[in-house]
Image: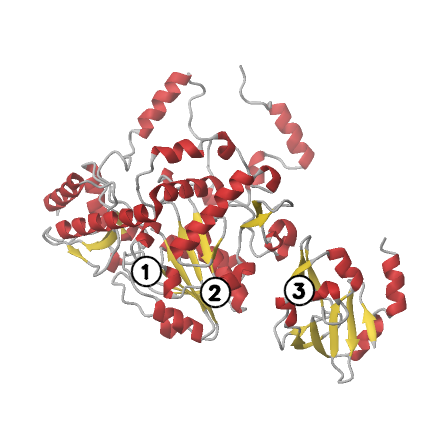
Amino acid sequence: MLRFTNEHEWIRVETDGAATVGITSYAQEQLGDVVYVELPALGKEVTKGGDAAVVESVKAASEVYAPVDGKVVAVNDKLSGEPSLVNSSPMGDGWFFRLQLSDKSQLDALMDEAAYKKFCEGQH
Amino acid sequence: MRYLPLTDADRRAMLQAIGVPSIDSLYRDVPEKARLKAPVDLPSHMGEIEVERAFQAFASANIGASAVPSFLGAGAYRHHIPATVDHLVQRGEFLTSYTPYQPEVSQGTLQALFEFQTQVALITGMEVANASMYDGATACAEAVMMANRITGRKKAILSGGLHPHYRAVCATHGRWSGFSLDAAEPDPEGDEDLAARVDGETSCVVVQSPSFFGHLRDHAALAQACHAKGALLVVVVTEIVSLGAVKSPGEMGADIVAAEGQSIGVPLGFGGPYLGLFATRERFVRQMPGRLCGETVDVDGRRGWVLTLSTREQHIRREKATSNICTNSGLCALAFTIHLSLLGEAGFTRLAALNHAKAVQLAERLGKVKGVSVVNDTFFNEFTLRLPKPAAQIVDTLAGRRILAGVPVSRFYPDKSPLANLLLVAATEMNTDADIGALAKALEEVL
């Protein structure tokens, strides 16, 4: 299941039940070349809408918010050496962290792909 | 000719517009006891010549540190500043330029700051340095907050050899930023051991080298003890000339160095403006406060300089910035860089050796005065004396003889009577043999 937030994060529930979080292609395009990513500590409890990571580009630095409540069970260490993965593969190798979800029903409030696409069109 | 732009009617109209009865009511946040009860008693008018004369009379009541034998130190040091420094910093291109946001019109300032950072990193033995902070004390507080960010912890241990003013600035920041301090008792003998105090809650240990009381210690073992518990070591230096003679904080394993750069190129100037130096390890650079200049190339591949990693700063990160410092002490940093460039590595080392030699000469002479003992077994250019009487009285008495004998420790610790007889004395390249003789003779007469 893939869902989107209006802060341009994506969250995908994997087969093991954990959810992967990253920023969308739209977000990376707006940021420009990503030069640094600050990831949360393993085991950190995050809350929906709270600060979880920082993404820094040549133009700006932005917070990445937790789409739902959960505990950080993995972070993408590759980003420290190769932050440009966020640009080249935002939905793939450029993922940020994985969450163990506290409450799966929170996903229902987020947008599906079609709704997010429409949301982005409204941003222009 | 009227010099005051507002009439009483103007004032009344403005007060009415904002809905307060009087100007005084705007100051109600200032504690009552700090407010004036009546206007300052000033004559209603005076001619320019009379004003000059009156202020010259006030000024002559001061004893200027450059006019008499002076042994004052305790965080601010009288050193020679070559005339070249004053001349170059007053060139319009440097004197009037502000914080260089626009690299295309600021290459001179940016290059100077880049050279400054390189010098600071080299003398502190660290990997990166920023473009300067306000002064040593605020740099120290920023170092503690940086350690808190890196470790995710909120308790700093402060050495009893840390300058009390630096400790006070840390306490002010801690009070409003929500971190705690474990401040050790004053350490005049230089024998404290902080390693045992470091625990899993400690973000950093802050030590000063040479200490407030003048002691030189190798903090390498303390650095290891900190790292074993996941804490950082912050080394504070208030007399930067010492780094021409002693092992650098970087060689001791410091993670952050916060220093006062006044000794190189900046006059005593009644206590400011001074120059905060800040250096750290490269892996911590994104948690470092302040401006940072970096080297780059332009579209044609030519070398140039820009402000770099600005995304850590307040004008971009707003309340999430690493620090509220969004500027630097540009002109003082430039003076530092010009002076240190004039000295060169060999000159800096010789200046340090000369300072130490003067202090040794002073210690040997004063140690012979009856009732006086030198507390330190090590020192750079400043040490602690134990007198047979309260030091503050002796300092006052000698000021009456136009000798600035040093700084009594009781000035910083008025409530600690065991410290009352301690006197900090500093000697630099400015002190002559005659100065040293005059202080020793005067002490012999008054003790």
Give the Cα separation between the discs numbered 1 and 2. Answer: 30 Å
Residue that extends furthest to the top in the rendered view of this protein: B1
Vertical position of residue B47 compared to residue B408: above or below: above
Q: In this view, does B365 lie to the left or right of B291?
A: left
* Residue B104 percent across, percent down from the top left: 61, 39
Disc 3 vs disc 1: Cβ atoms closer than 8 Å?
Answer: no
Disc 1 vs disc 2: Cβ atoms closer than 8 Å?
Answer: no
Circle 2 residue:
B180
Circle 3 residue:
A83
Q: Is residue B193 left or right of residue B35?
A: left
Query: Disc 1 residue type?
Result: Lys
Where disc 3 sits, the SS reads: loop
Q: Crowding near pointer 1: few (<14 within 10 Å), some, many (20+)?
A: some
Protein chain holding label 2: B
Query: Disc 3 residue type?
Result: Pro
Numbered circle sitting on residue B247: 1
Figure label count: 3
The residue depicted at 28 percent of the width and 57 percent of the height is: B213
Where disc 2 sits, the SS reads: strand
Q: Which of marks 3 and 1 is in front?
A: 3
Query: Disc 2 residue type?
Result: Ser
* Residue A82 percent across, percent down from the top left: 65, 66
Tell me, yes or no, whether dots 3 and 2 are on the same chain: no
Give the Cα separation between the discs numbered 3 and 2. Answer: 35 Å
* Residue B6 percent across, percent down from the top left: 59, 24
